[in-house]
Amino acid sequence: MRATSLAIPDVILFEPKVFGDERGFFYESFNQKVFEDAVGKPVHFVQDNHSKSAKGVLRGLHYQIKQAQGKLVRVIRGEVFDVAVDLRKSSPTFGQWAGTYLSENNRAQLWIPEGFAHGFVVLSESAEFLYKTTDFWAPEHERSLAWNDADVAIDWPISEPPTLSAKDTNATRFAEAETFA
């Protein structure tokens, strides 16, 4: 498994070695030691989530201001453009974003540490998205950062307005968002 930092060094792309032939394929999708060596600290996952979304659905940018969640995300069906926004005030990349394509074909995974907002837009007809989290979902602490905030200026690879939830339609602008120390 190859680990590569994106534009924000703490956001890491994991690309597996895939062994395939006419019968199908095999790959190691997670290895605790390889993962912890790449992120540079022990990580304990407590929850796995699975979502399915239609083309054009944009989920995010979500984070929990308390019980912050690190996320290891991947796509098992379809393709998404996945984004992490640094909300750590003490970080040299505060307010910056990193993004990458995740798909059933590239089988890549993205590590988004605590202190980041996370979101994705579905580019294929539908997509199934899996992710592990380092803390439990706490709806009372969940926040949503506006996907189209001009201060963050994410270059989403879409030409039509995305389909959003009510929460994401009413998301907070970056200038007013609660952030991390």
Image (cartoon, rainbow, N blue to C red):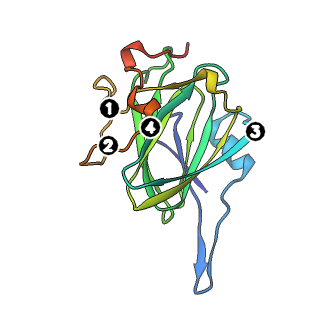
Do the residues under discs 1 and 2 have CB atoms within 8 angstroms? yes
Which callout, 1 or 4, points to the residue nearer the camera? 4
* Numbered circle sitting on residue 165: 4
Identity, as a three-letter code, of the amino acid under mark 1: Asn
Is residue 83 at least partly visible in the picture? no
Q: Which residue is mark 2?
A: 156
Q: Is residue 160 above or below residue 136?
A: below
Q: Quadrant of residue 146?
A: top left
Do the residues under discs 3 and 2 have CB atoms within 8 angstroms? no
Q: Which sits earlier in the primary sequence, circle 4 or circle 2?
A: 2
Q: Secondary structure at mark 1?
A: loop
The residue carrying pointer 3 sits among few (fewer than 14), some (14 to 19) or many (20 or more) residues within 10 Å by Cα, namely: few
Residue toward you, 29 or 9: 29
The residue carrying pointer 1 sits among few (fewer than 14), some (14 to 19) or many (20 or more) residues within 10 Å by Cα, namely: some
Q: Which residue is mark 1?
A: 148
Q: Which sits earlier in the primary sequence, circle 3 or circle 4?
A: 3
Identity, as a three-letter code, of the amino acid under mark 4: Ser
Q: Position of residue 115 (x, y in %)?
A: 56, 25
Which callout, 1 or 2, points to the residue nearer the camera? 1
Residue toward you, 49 or 94: 49
Q: CA distance from mark 4 to mark 2?
A: 17 Å
Q: Secondary structure at mark 4?
A: loop
Residue occupying image coordinates x 63% and y 27%? 139
Q: Which sits earlier in the primary sequence, circle 1 or circle 3?
A: 3
Q: Which residue is mark 3?
A: 46
